[in-house]
Amino acid sequence: MSWRVNRLTVDVQQGDLTIQDVDAIVNAANNDLELGGGVAGAIARAGGPAIQAECRTIGPIEIGDAAITGGGKLKARHVIHAASMRLGGRTTAESLRQSTRRTLEIADQRGLHSIAFPAIGTGIAHFPMPECARIMIEEVVALAPAATSLREVRFVLFGDDAESAFRSEAERQLSAK
C-alpha cells in the first residue's frame, strides 16, 4: 500500500529487502559496520564480500550515524548502513531516530531517488516494532518537505507483524496528509 507526502511516495510491503530495485537499501547496522546476522547477514550474503570490505574502510562510526557503500551484487546501487546500536547491543529510540534521519539525509544529499528500509533495530537489538514504525515514519514525514531528490521510500518488512505495525502507523500518520 502507498501514500503520498509532499513529493514522496511511501510504500509498505512484505518482502525481501535484498532484491529491491532501488537506488539504495538500508542495513540495520551496528556502529562497527560488521555485517553479522539478521538484515546485515542477508545483505552480506546477497551482495557479496565487497560490501563488508568497503565497510571495514569506513567503520567504526558513531551510534546514530549512517554510512554509504556500494551495493556489490545487489540490484540496489548502494547500501546505507544505519548504525542504531553497538555490536551485540540494543537499539534505543534516540539512536533509531538519529540513524533513520541521517540515512534519509545521505540519500537526499547523494541525489538518490528511491530507498528501501527494513524495520531497523527490531531483530537482535529487540526494539519494539510499533515504536520502530512510529519513529521511522515520523522521520520520513519530517524529511518530506525538504527532500530535493528522494521520491520513493519503501518499508520492506519481514513477517506479518512488521507489515501490520508499519501499515497501521502509515495509515495514522500519512492518511491525513
Image (cartoon, rainbow, N blue to C red):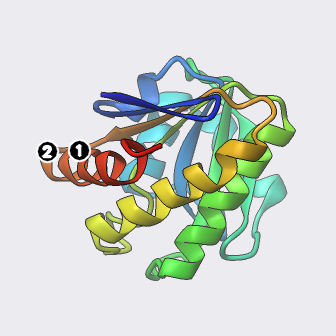
Q: Which residue is mark 1?
A: 163
Horizontally, residue 58 falls left or right of residue 124, namely: right
Residue located at (54% from left, 49% from top)? 27
Whether 171 is drawn above or below 19: the answer is below
Evaluate if marks 1 and 2 touch, with contact meaning CB atoms under 8 Å apart: yes
Quadrant occupied by the N terminus = top left
Residue 53 visible in rendering: no
**Looking at the rendering, which quadrant does residue 131 occupy?**
bottom left
As displayed, is residue 164 above or below residue 135? Answer: above
Residue at 23 percent across and 44 percent down: it is 163
The correct choice, above or below, for 20 with respect to 139 in the image is above
As helix, strand or loop, the secondary structure at mark 2 comes to: helix
Near-viewer residue (23 or 152)? 152
The answer to which of 20 and 137 lies nearer the viewer is 137
Position of residue 162 in the picture relative to residue 68 (left or right): left
How busy is the neighbourhood of tag 1: few (under 14 within 10 Å), some, or many (20 plus)?
Answer: many
Residue closest to the eye, 177 or 76: 177
Tell me where residue 168 appears, x and y as whole percent: 24, 51
Q: Nearer the viewer, residue 176 or 57?
A: 176
Q: Amino acid at mark 2?
A: Asp
Image coords of residue 47 (percent x, y): 55, 30
Identified at 38% across, 74% down, the residue is: 125
Mark 2 lies on residue? 160
